[in-house]
Image: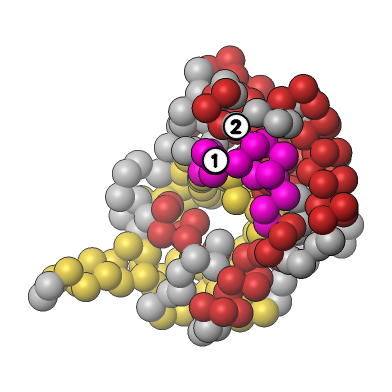
Amino acid sequence: MKRGNPILELKNVWKTYEMGTVKVNALKDVSLKIERGEFVAVVGASGSGKSTMMNIVGCLDIPTKGSVYLDNKDISEMSESNLSTIRGKKIGFIFQQFNLIPTLTALENVTLPLLFQNIPPARRKHIATELLTKFGLKERMTHKPAELSGGQSQRVAISRALANDPELILADEPTGNLDSKTGEEVMKELENIHKRQGKTVVLVTHDLNLVHHAERVIYLKDGMVEKIRGKKR
């Protein structure tokens, strides 16, 4: 894998929200690089700007000022249609709330992003079956979310995030709804995805107990990068 080749780069990024006559700067002149294949944790207290950063690097929002490069393409002024296309092909999301569709089985939840990419039905089923089996859910593929434990639901969500073979995994408080033992198992899964598959993983969390899994830790405070610990690989 080529070193010094950032998959993500933020240059002087600001995000300003207007609340009536008041302007709130959620991000203030943030500049940073995340290399391809890195495992990075972004941490900070509530209101630090980490969720705003997550939305911007995940192509869910665009900055007020500054530039954001994903795979050397400036996404900061792209249309929603183009952002949606990039999200579907290059980014896998893992959320605290799992965000599984309750009326669909585990298998159907994992095939959903493949459907949006126009993958043929047989291929969709094959990919989803392989992923769920890999994560120990072979016997749970026909179960709906209400019939799964928290850990099983999060593994379904991880499988769904990997379905399109994205280059970047964004994990937003992935252990927030899990007990400590199950949360540690999920973090080990993310480590394996990073180490064995070479995926770039960005973990967004307020839980400092999780940062030892990452190679670098970016600390946000009041919308700014306060410090960065660890070294680029």
| Residue 225 placement (x, y as % from top left) | 44, 56
Q: Is residue 227 left or right of residue 41?
A: left
User: Mark 1 Cα within 10 Å, few/some/many (few <14, many 20+)?
Assistant: few
Q: Which mark, residue 150?
A: none
Q: Give the labeled residue for mark 1.
A: 103
Q: Amino acid at mark 2?
A: Lys
Magenta region includes residue 101: yes
User: For numbered disc 1, what is the local secondary structure?
Assistant: loop
Q: Quadrant of residue 114?
A: bottom right
**Do we see residue 131 in this rendering?**
yes
Q: Which residue is rendered at x = 21% and y = 73% of the image?
A: 18
Magenta stretch in the rendered image = 98-113
| Residue 28 placement (x, y as % from top left) | 36, 67
Q: Give the labeled residue for mark 2.
A: 144
Q: Amino acid at mark 1?
A: Thr
Q: Nearer the viewer, residue 200 or 44?
A: 200
Q: Which residue is rendered at x = 47% and y = 38% of the image?
A: 97
Q: Vertically, is 211 above or below 51?
A: above
* Spatial separation of the CA atoms under disc 1 and disc 2: 7 Å
Q: Vertically, is 212 above or below 127?
A: above
Q: Is residue 46 left or right of residue 52?
A: left
Q: Vertically, is 76 above or below 128?
A: below
